[in-house]
Image (spheres, grey):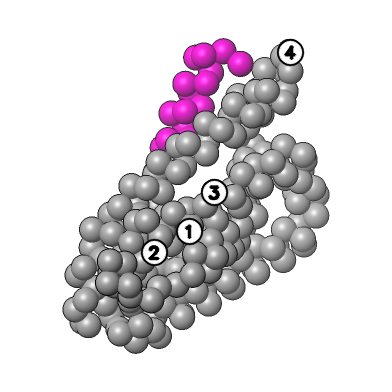
Amino acid sequence: MSLHLWWLFVATVFVVSAIPGPNMLLVMTHGARHGLKRSTATMAGCLTALVIMLSVSAAGLGVFLEAWPRLFDTLRLAGAGYLVWLGVKSWRAKASAIDVRDESAGTPSVKRVTLFRNGFLVASSNPKAILFAAALLPQFIDASRPILPQFAVLVSTFAVIEVSWYAVYAGLGARIGDKLKSASVAQAFNRLTGGVFVAFGAMMALVRH
């Protein structure tokens, strides 16, 4: 892979990763509710799922899903259902349910494994990511050179850029976290994020590849 091609990949992933989606919304929400430090568990969950999806796309699962549209639709609808469930749960949550953290005071908080699981499930809820990766990665692979090293470089580059954007969104969420101590603001935040998650789920269910 040439340096020019790698920089093109960097620019492409930088723009694509910056676009707000379910992953970024979840990371920002957890940053607001649990703080930047604890939201790293959410980031780790999202990134783990995406790296796995990149890996399976390289193994040809994207082609498999294209060949078996019913399986793709099943995964797509399951992912859409999970996002809608997440949105309804957030919408119906009481304002007091948002625990604006105070780690120095020892305020109880959600376990990191729960945050990791939520991040993993949201990131893996959209099988379109597999098809996107299957379509994107081959464009930056030089078939005349060993494939595995190139793939490792591309995935590592993707991971660094994706995590950087996670940190930006989580940091933004953490900055508004203190405002959630107001019950009215907390309720508005619940309903805004809940509505957006439901919208993402509806779009995933309705828009076909």
Q: On the image, numbered disc 3 is attached to which residue?
A: 47
Amino acid tagged 4? Ser
Snapshot quadrant of residue 81: bottom right
- Main SS, magenta region, reads helix
Q: CA distance from mark 1 to mark 3?
A: 9 Å
- Mark 2 Cα-neighbour bin, 10 Å: few <14, some 14–19, many ≥20: many
Q: On the image, numbered disc 2 is attached to which residue?
A: 30
Q: CA distance from mark 1 to mark 2?
A: 7 Å
In the depicted view, which residue is nearer to us: 29 or 85?
29
Q: Are marks 1 and 2 in contact (CB under 8 Å)?
A: yes
Whole-percent x and y of residue 110? 45, 72
- Mark 3 Cα-neighbour bin, 10 Å: few <14, some 14–19, many ≥20: many
Q: Which residues are magenta?
A: 1-16
Q: On the image, numbered disc 1 is attached to which residue?
A: 42
Residue 122 showing in the rendered view: no
Q: Earlier in the sequence, mark 4 or mark 3?
A: 3
Q: Is residue 120 above or below residue 140?
A: below
Residue 144 image label:
4
